[in-house]
Amino acid sequence: METKYVYLFNEGDANMRNLLGGKGANLAEMSKLGMPVPNGFTITTEACNKYYDDGEVISDEIQAQIMEYLEKLEEETGKKFGDQENPLLVSVRSGARASMPGMMDTILNLGINDVVANTIAEKSGNERFAYDSYRRFIQMFADVVKGLSKKRFEEIIDEVKAERGIKDDLELTADDMKTLVEKFKEFYRSELGEDFPTDPKTQMMEAIEAVFRSWNNERAIYYRRMNDIPSNWGTAVNVQMMVFGNMGEDCGTGVAFTRNPATGENKLYGEFLMNAQGEDVVAGVRTPKKIDQLKEVSPTAYDQFVEICSKLENHYKNMQDMEFTIENGKLFMLQTRNGKRTAQAALKIACDMVDEGLISTDEALMMVEPQQLDSLLHPTFAKEALEAAEVITSALPASPGAGCGQIVFTAEEAKEEADKGKKVILVRLETSPEDIEGMAVSQGILTVRGGMTSHAAVVARGMGACCVSGAGDIEMNEEEGSFKVNGKTFKRGDWISIDGSTGNVYGEAIETVPAEISGDFERFMEWADKRRRLKVRTNADTPKDAKQAVDFGAEGIGLVRTEHMFFEGDKIKAIREMIVAKNDDQMQAALDKLEPMQQKDFEGIYEAMEGRPVTIRYLDPPLHEFVPTNPEDIKELANEMNISEAELNQVISNLHEVNPMMGHRGSRLDVSNPGIAKMQTAAVIKAALNVNKKHPEWNIEPEIMLPLIGDLAELKYVKKLVTETADAILKEAGSDMKYHVGTMIEVPRAALLADEIAEEAEFFSFGTNDLTQLTFGFSRDDAGKFLPQYYAAKIYENDPFARLDQNGVGKLIEMAANLGRKTRPDMKLGVCGEHGGDPASIEFVDKVGLNYVSCSPFRVPIARLAAAQATIKNEKA
Ligand code: ADP
Ligand code: MG
Ligand code: MG
């Protein structure tokens, strides 16, 4: 049987979204509900996919079906393409399964040529309208189908206006419009070497093809990647009879939301323009009027619209975003969809709709996008102040938030100034692990180089600090303590503001307001907590982060990275002494200095977590990260340590590795320097004993996690260092405190041998960053260089470091979880990589039955909601 590639609007409904696209399915649904929708038909997403499969041609079969449906449309409307009496004009509109506002193309007024324009002029008695429609069509067709720049057309309009000495488009007369049509056609011919097509059927087929093509334009591809939309979904194309909002003063066009998309207030919100078409309202050429005012201008249409709005909202059980046109006082609905909204509005709408009895709490939970909550957790710019400020440059929105402070150029300066109580923005070419403390005290980080997964971006997101990265327009002059951007110079101490949600940088201080979980947000999160199966822990290295995470609802810590504590103050000195130690005594002396400092760190974290579980991971990075790189710092360190610069340089170059990420790190450090594991164990056990003494009710049982294990014998070796040290301390203290030793699963070999490893490991935590890195065999620090080419070639669609690769890495996780539980059925399993805060990854983690995810403090609320959604979805599946 022949595949059906085309559907009339009245053959479809909202359930056919995958096939008809969102716009097509909703137009069909509105028709079915008896609402006034101009007739039309939809060419399916399957047709789009076939267009690509066939090598970017519309097959004869599909062309034939389109022609057949065009005839049906002509019958339905009583109008005909190219007709001299009653010509049919249509719009050709894109519409994918997921709404991708503004990403793909639409053409209006298709079907016009000289004869048709003349007919329309006579029939409507409105010559200006006829030729206005005509010139708009040429503009859109030339842009969308032929890729001619819109700018030239705008220039031609400006030239005509200048010649005539007028300012407003509305002042253009019928003759001016005719002149524009001629000039546009001339430009079209001179650019393309062919005449503007006069046959409406040719116009239509070319337009349909252009919409198919627009599925793969750069904007659309980028949008899909950002929003997890698979490229094989394809777009549908809607061909719809035109209705005219630009035919006179009793005509108009508008957009409206059933509730306020910024605040969530339950009140119709929208704008319209009389005597206008299509995008005029959003394009901002003329200032639109508030929807309420439509009541006076076109009362019948207004009343009908209000009634339709409430019907649609009840029907879809969601806030709707609608387009309408009024033709000679009569209302037509052109689109409806679930409206995009701010996080604040999303929560209010969800709570209100539950109270109104419109939806269940489960439905409310599914209505809010987890990622969106992020914007509610960081201080934000006061809206009006932001609007008034001037953007000096724009770069990657690497970590959301509002940062406002005085410029500093080094991490040390940041610390000094912050100690004095100043607010600073750290501006760097790029950041390195040594900058971490400076980053932590800054209001925001701005880097010239680096992408969304650069060190600065990852660390900033981890800390919940605002960060804008890759601001290539900035010319740094670190020596002078200034930078230049777009002709302006900014000096150390000058105020700037950065917006981590948009990537905008402002040359002035902008007022901010802090975040809190209260009201609708709090109520909503309680529903999520009741519903989710997965526990949510946090990755935190300091008491401050730990407290923040608890405030955001964390139930424990899944990952304490002990190395982050080593960068502070005296600790970095002691660790450097350890690294350059020439004999066991010097080594031990350094470790003896470190132990009490580590113990204090752990006590702080245990105190902050008030008895919640805390998993502490032992030293992980290669030691070279702890030694200085620039000659001055090396000199200073050599002096401090009483060794020659040459000697120190020797130590540093010995630490050099070709592949540090696959190098001497993780538990490998403990195998070659057993003292490190022993020192860390002593610090953990003593800290827990101390805090338990003060708070016996907390009953802390330390969870010790060994990184980068790849073999059972390796685990046994390091675990023995831990247990011998711990047991000796416990014995001496006469304590029966329990403690647990587990591993990270981040080397593929450990996943393969998880059943063996589980003999000694009491728990697993999947370190998905390293596991991804080692499974793909590419470094996350370098992959940004070539991944874009992989996206372009459609080899990978997403950054596997941001979105868990379920096929490959996911398979390893599932396998290791099953193997581990075979050996140890009650084993606790978690994820502690970057993916722990990513909703799609959380859904997967829920499906394979792990116990918890662990993510940075600022992602905890996101993970709580994502986990609830995962439970609801996986229950249904
Ligand atoms: P987008 O997806 O970018 O919103 P649309 O396909 O919805 O693009 O159309 C762009 C504009 O043209 C919208 O304002 C829409 O209301 C208007 N429009 C589309 N089809 C018609 C039509 N048949 N008659 C009148 N206006 C239309
Ligand atoms: Mg639209
Ligand atoms: Mg790791």
Image: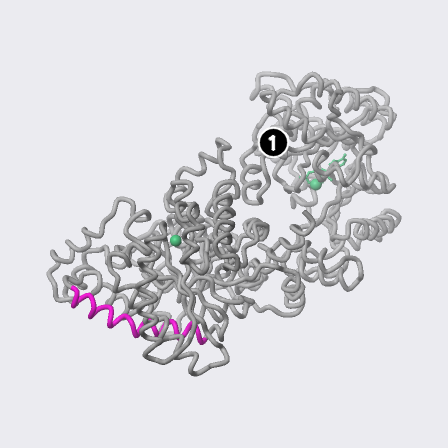
**SS of the residue under disc 1:** helix
Q: Residues within 10 Å of mark 1 (few under 14, many from 20)?
A: many
**Which one is in front, 727 or 188?**
727
The residue nearer to you, when weighing 450 against 673, is 673
Whether the magenta-drawn stretch holds residue 593 is answered as yes
* 239 sits to left or right of 85: left
Q: Is residue 408 visible?
A: no
The x and y percentages for residue 803 are 51, 46
> Magenta segment range?
584-607
**Residue 22, image quadrant:** top right
User: Residue 531 sits in which quadrant?
Assistant: bottom right
Residue drawn at (40%, 42%) of the image: 783
Q: Is residue 594 left or right of residue 396?
A: left
Please name the residue shown 22% across and 64% down the image. 578
The quarter of the picture where the N terminus appears is: top right
Relative depth, front residue between 814 and 387: 814
Q: Position of residue 584 (x, y in %)?
A: 17, 65
> Majority secondary structure of the magenta segment?
helix
Residue 249 against residue 214 in the figure, above or below: below
Q: Is residue 606 above or below residue 707?
A: below
What colour scheme governs how the chains and residues are painted in the rendered image of this protein? one colour
User: Measured from the top left, where is residue 581 in percent x and y?
Assistant: 17, 63
What amino acid is labelled 1 in the image?
Ser
- Identify residue for label 1: 214
Whether residue 313 is visible, yes or no, is: yes
